[in-house]
Amino acid sequence: MFEILSSLLKYLFVTVIYLFIYGVIRLIYLDIKSASSQKFEIKKNIPYLKLINIREQFDFKIEEIYMLGKDVDIGRSAKNKIIIKDPYMSTNHARFSYKDRTYFVEDLGSTNGTFVNGRQVKNTAMPIKDGDKIRIGQVDFLFVYGG
């Protein structure tokens, strides 16, 4: 009886070890897969928004990086170039624009506001520079100019 129980525990222990190793390998695979599934490649001279938050804390889809062009709107509406289904983000929340070799962020009358380095963007567009922290809804971005 003891020998049967001992053999059963050995097989159970080996199975648990294999399941643990499988779980670790699966996590590594998923991490590599998500890192390589970027829709675009970061180019040196193109400004972008880099997500600061941990993606897993949100229950909506969000990318790690959003490339910016001359005029880019962000919000929940499908009419925006950057669409994020954050419930704290307005339909048309903010606009990023480029003028005279400077990027600006403008709040489009959102409910919860747009913030640059903790300061709320009010009536006019606010200039932003490399390294500025931008909060839109409950999402924090780092502005990377690269130019």
Image (spheres, grey):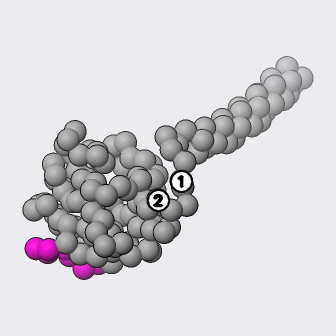
84 left or right, relative to 17:
left
Query: Which label sits in the foreground, 1 or 2?
Result: 2
Expressed as whole percent of the image width and height from the top left, the position of residue 35 reads 58, 45
Q: Is residue 58 above or below residue 117?
A: above
Element on which disc 2 rests:
loop
Residue 137 in sight in this render: no
* Residue 97 or residue 86, whichever sits in front: 97
**In whole angstroms, how far apart are the C-alphas of marks 1 and 2?**
8 Å
Amino acid found under the numbered disc labelled 1? Ile
Expressed as whole percent of the image width and height from the top left, the position of residue 32 reads 64, 42
Element on which disc 1 rests:
loop
Mark 2 surroundings within 10 Å by alpha-carbon count, few (fewer than 14), some (14 through 19), many (20 or more): few
Q: Is residue 65 above or below residue 96?
A: above
* Residue 100 or residue 43, whichever sits in front: 100
Residue that mark 1 sits on:
42
* Residue 57 or residue 142, whichever sits in front: 142
Expressed as whole percent of the image width and height from the top left, the position of residue 86 reads 26, 49
Q: Residue at x 50, y 67 (%)?
A: 146
Residue that mark 2 sits on:
46
Residue 11 in sight in this render: yes
**In the orientation shown, which residue stands out farthest toward the right?**
3
Mark 1 surroundings within 10 Å by alpha-carbon count, few (fewer than 14), some (14 through 19), many (20 or more): some
Q: Quadrant of residue 8?
A: top right
Q: Which residues are magenta?
A: 118-124
Report the magenta stretch's main SS: loop
42 left or right, relative to 1:
left
